[in-house]
Image (tube, helix red, strand yellow):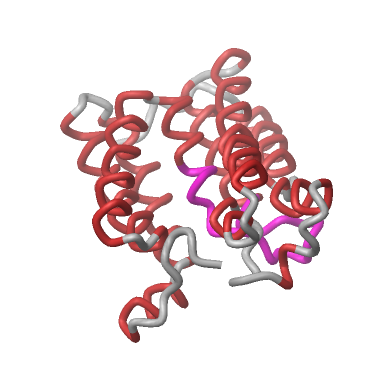
Amino acid sequence: MIPDITTSLTGLIAWASIGYLLGSVPFGIVIARALGLGDLRQIGSGNIGATNVLRTGSKLGAFLTLILDAGKAGIAALLALVFAGPDAAQLAGFAAFVGHCFPIWLRFKGGKGVATFFGLLFALAWPVGLATGATWLAIAGVFRYSSFAALISSAAAIGWAFFLGFPQMIALCLALAIMIYWRHGENIQRIKDGTETKIGQK
């Protein structure tokens, strides 16, 4: 369910701190301002992620935000993996995810973590990331709701970790899925009400 704990408590705290600070960088806001798209928090859903950047009509901005947000957790996890171990890598990646959702620079009002979630999966277990990404694409392609695709794919990641031979990732995937469902509470209600914004809709 989890990797063996081989890193000292001090080391785990240090890597969690590094991951959180990396995850806290609000790339969506930075990219939107750099491209003259305005304050992302005043556009669409007010979210700082790639989906909301896409609502401005800027595919470039959305792509850059997606890559950078995904890279935050991926880099944090890979650095910890190289210099510490799998336990520190999972913790650093999860801390980056939390940092994206609750960034200290934005008074803890951040994004929903979907891109950061995928970046972490690809960094630690690329087959799980690939299968989960394919799940997202399939659901998004059929229903045209980014949020619904995120909800289904995050839950599916738990199963993919088990079936693809990464049992040490199950607890992490479960924690990530719980966080994603929590962060998508308003989206879930809008899906029920039929008012959720579709992909590509400004």
Q: Is residue 92 above or below residue 58?
A: above
Instruction: Pick whichever, 6 or 146, lies toward us.
Output: 146
Q: Is residue 22 above or below residue 55?
A: above
Percent across and percent down for residue 30 are: 79, 48
> In the rendered structure, which segment of residues is drawn in magenta?
100-117
Instruction: Pick whichever, 59 or 21, lies toward us.
Output: 59
Judge left or right: residue 52 versus residue 169: right
Instruction: Pick whichever, 157 or 162, lies toward us.
Output: 157
Judge left or right: residue 11 versus residue 153: right
Residue 116 is inside the magenta segment: yes
Residue 20 is inside the magenta segment: no
Q: In this view, does 193 lie above or below 2?
A: below
Percent across and percent down for residue 76 are: 62, 30
- Residue at the image position 65 percent from the left and 50 percent from the top: 99
- Residue at the image position 24 percent from the left and 56 percent from the top: 142
Q: Tell me which corner region of the image, top left, top right, bottom left or bottom right, holds residue 198.
A: bottom left
Percent across and percent down for residue 63 are: 59, 40
